[in-house]
Image (tube, rainbow, N blue to C red):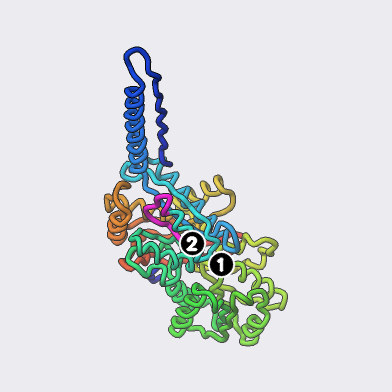
């Protein structure tokens, strides 16, 4: 298969100054002077201790939806990123330094993501692992570019998420997901006639659809219907499904998120339409939808670089530890975040940056190192990055079988 490019807390020291009452030959003025000197000395010691503690820790800021419709993504990223941080610290840290993660809720909203970034700056963040979704990630790139702060998004897939040279991503970009999906369907002869249902109000969805349609021209299947919906009209898909059915589509491509996908699968079943369904990383999470009949997702295929049932030791250890700590099986977003933290670790090691350096100097070191490192992660072996922020790794697909994601 082809490769696709463009995929301590701070110690607080309290000083107590004891002013001794004058007695014998010591007068009040001498006492006040001694107290003043002791107070100044204690203050200096506090400041030095605080700086010494922070100088031993790299502060990583992150943001994503911990509440709202896309919370399943943000929670997975937060959980797995913290898991990676804990593992690295337990193993001795990075070049003798520890990592600390502060993850803020952005509700998958661009404005709130910028607010989260400002909170993280005030906290002392030196690099950003986020945002989780594309709109917030794009908004945050404007701020990290202005501050020259290193940014690595685990899962922001829109092209603009890596529009500046300080920005990188772990996941594939939208165009790569679309083209890779078309190639996978064509090369594996999964369908002859394909319908697409996409969200025309979503940068994520339209980006994937456009590249899918372009690559489909090179494949041995035909797009017989391409039907859009918007964020204001995403509950009734009967019209789109009927057009796909009437056109004879034997596979429906869904470059959309899991909430809408669950409705489409339910409505297709109610109208007796049972094509194959193929999607991308946005579908990951469908098995967690409340009141959704999981049997309707049986056989659904997703283009994703992570399968929780993979038999390699890294994946098995990750899945078992994640389940033990957080309950439930980790999704691709969790795997992306885990790899992101380990990529940051590798870039720190390669560049030799230290926590006492400026944010800008750390950024310069990390962005250069990102093009030199290679890591074996959950989402790809021999994963590397281009100067424009895109990952090099193999796309894979999984199928939902008996309620679990199974590698194809």
Residue 205 percent location from the top left of the image: 52, 74
Numbered disc 2: secondary structure = helix
Callout 1: few (<14), some (14-19), or many (20+) C-alpha neighbours within 10 Å? many
Q: Which residues, given as a range, are shown in magenta?
A: 121-132
> Can residue 358 be seen at all in this image of the molecule?
yes
> Can residue 188 be seen at all in this image of the molecule?
no
Residue that carries the numbered disc 2 in the rendered image:
113
Residue 298 percent location from the top left of the image: 63, 66
* Residue depicted at x 33% and y 39%: 52
Decide if residue 58 is on the left or right side of residue 306. Answer: left
Q: How far apart are marks 2 and 1 (CA)?
A: 23 Å
For marks 2 and 1 on the same chain, the one whose residue lies earlier in the sequence: 2
Nearest to the observer: residue 225 or residue 397: 225
Q: Is residue 138 magenta?
A: no
Decide if residue 240 is on the left or right side of residue 318. Answer: right
Residue that carries the numbered disc 1 in the rendered image:
283
Nearest to the observer: residue 121 or residue 16: 16
Disc ID at residue 226: none
């Amino acid at each position: 298969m082809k490769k696709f490019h463009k995929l301590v807390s701070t110690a607080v020291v309290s000083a107590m100054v004891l002013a001794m009452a004058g007695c014998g030959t010591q007068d009040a003025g001498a006492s006040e002077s001694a107290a003043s000197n002791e107070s100044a000395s204690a203050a200096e010691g506090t400041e030095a201790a605080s700086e010494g503690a922070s100088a031993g820790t790299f502060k990583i800021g992150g943001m994503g939806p911990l509440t709202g419709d896309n919370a399943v993504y943000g929670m997975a990223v937060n959980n797995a990123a913290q898991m990676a941080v804990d593992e690295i610290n337990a193993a001795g840290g990075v070049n003798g330094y520890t990592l600390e993660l502060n993850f803020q809720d952005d509700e998958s909203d661009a404005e709130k993501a910028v607010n989260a970034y400002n909170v993280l700056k005030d906290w002392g963040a030196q690099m950003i692992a986020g945002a989780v979704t594309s709109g917030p990630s794009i908004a945050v790139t404007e701020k990290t570019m202005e501050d020259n702060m290193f940014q690595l998004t685990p899962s922001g897939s829109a092209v603009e998420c890596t529009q500046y040279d300080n920005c990188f991503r772990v996941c594939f970009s939208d165009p790569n997901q679309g083209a890779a999906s078309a190639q996978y369907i064509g090369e594996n002869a999964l369908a002859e006639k394909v319908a697409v249902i996409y969200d025309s109000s979503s940068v994520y969805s339209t980006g994937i659809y456009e590249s899918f349609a372009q690559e489909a021209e090179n494949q041995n299947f035909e797009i017989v219907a391409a039907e859009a919906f918007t964020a204001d009209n995403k509950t009734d898909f009967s019209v789109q499904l009927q057009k796909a059915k009437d056109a004879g589509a034997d596979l429906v491509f869904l470059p959309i998120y899991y909430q809408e996908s669950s409705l489409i699968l339910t409505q297709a079943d109610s109208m007796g339409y049972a094509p194959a369904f193929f999607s991308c990383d946005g579908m990951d999470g469908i098995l967690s939808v409340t009141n959704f009949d999981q049997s309707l997702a049986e056989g659904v295929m997703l283009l994703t670089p992570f399968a929780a049932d993979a038999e390699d030791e890294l994946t098995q250890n990750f899945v078992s530890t994640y389940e033990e700590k957080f309950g439930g099986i980790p999704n691709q977003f969790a795997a992306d975040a885990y790899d992101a933290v380990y990529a940051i670790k590798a870039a720190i090691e390669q560049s030799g940056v230290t926590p006492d350096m400026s944010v800008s100097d750390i950024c310069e070191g990390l962005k250069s190192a990102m093009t030199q490192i290679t890591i074996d992660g959950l989402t790809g072996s021999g994963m590397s990055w281009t100067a424009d922020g895109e990952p090099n790794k193999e796309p894979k697909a999984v199928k939902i079988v008996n309620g679990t994601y199974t590698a194809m």
